[in-house]
Each structure stands twice: as C-alpha cells, then as structure tokens.
Image: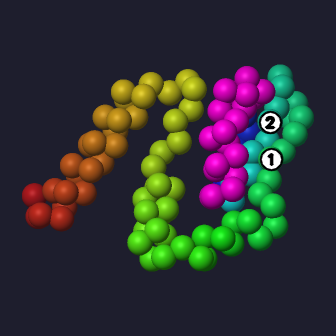
Amino acid sequence: MERIIDVTTARRQFSTLLDEVFHKGDTVTISRKGKPLARIVPIEGAHSQTEQFSSRQRALLEKLHSLPSLAIDQDPVAVLRSMREQKRIRAGKKYGE
C-alpha cells in the first residue's frame, strides 16, 4: 500500500512507518505543503522474510495487517467503537443472530 503523509506526521510516527515498510512492504511518500520530498520503500527481499515464519506467526501477522491504521486526525475512541461494532456483527453472523 502506498501512503502520502506530511513531514510532521512522519517525524512523530517514524518508528511506526519503518515497521510498516519493513513488515507490510508499504511505501510511504513524505511531503511538505503537498510537494513530495522523499519516499521510504522496503529493501529488495526484506519483505520475503515473512516466508520464514511459522503458520501461527503468519496468522498473527494477517490479524495485525487487518487492523485499521490510526491517523493523527482520527478520534481513537471512534475507531475502537467501529472495531467493536464490526466484531459484534461477525459474532452475530457466526452464531446465526
């Protein structure tokens, strides 16, 4: 997935951005005033390290990747409520409600 973020957000979330680039294979473009300045891309072959994980670790990574990304301008409470509501809907479908 490719994302464009501003310099301030990149500075605040640099560690998280590096993790996303390494583990998910995402590409992040850093911009200032709408003008692209730099791009963080995964190193060739670095993303293929996930092939060395066990099936349980891969399943956990899939769950991690399915979690929504939280941007600076999003309300964390609203995101959590949305996640809980989706979980209730899936549980209801599973048990025939």
Q: Residue 40: which disc?
A: 1
Q: Which residue bears the numbered disc 2?
A: 30
Q: Is residue 96 magenta?
A: no
Q: Residues within 10 Å of mark 2 (few under 14, many from 20)?
A: many
Above or below 10: residue 20: below
Above or below 33: residue 21: below
Above or below 72: residue 20: below
Where residue 52 sits: x, y (%)?
59, 76
The answer to whether residue 2 shows anywhere in this view is: no
On the picture, is 97 further left or further right than 2? left
**Label 2 is placed on what type of residue?**
Ile
On the picture, is 63 further left or further right than 46? left
The quadrant in which residue 96 appears is bottom left
Q: Nearer the viewer, residue 14 or 6?
A: 14
Q: Nearer the viewer, residue 20 or 93?
A: 20
CB atoms of marks 2 and 1 within 8 Å: yes
The quadrant in which residue 24 appears is bottom right
Write the residue at 69% across / 66% down: 47
Write the residue at 87% across / 30% down: 35
**Label 1 is placed on what type of residue?**
Ile
- For marks 2 and 1, give the CA distance: 8 Å
Q: Residue 2: which disc?
A: none
Quarter the C terminus occupies = bottom left
Extent of the magenta region = 6-24
Write the residue at 43% across / 59% down: 63
Where residue 44 sits: x, y (%)?
82, 67
Secondary structure type for disc 2? strand
Q: Nearer the viewer, residue 14 or 71?
A: 14
The quadrant in which residue 94 appears is bottom left
Where residue 90 sits: x, y (%)?
25, 57
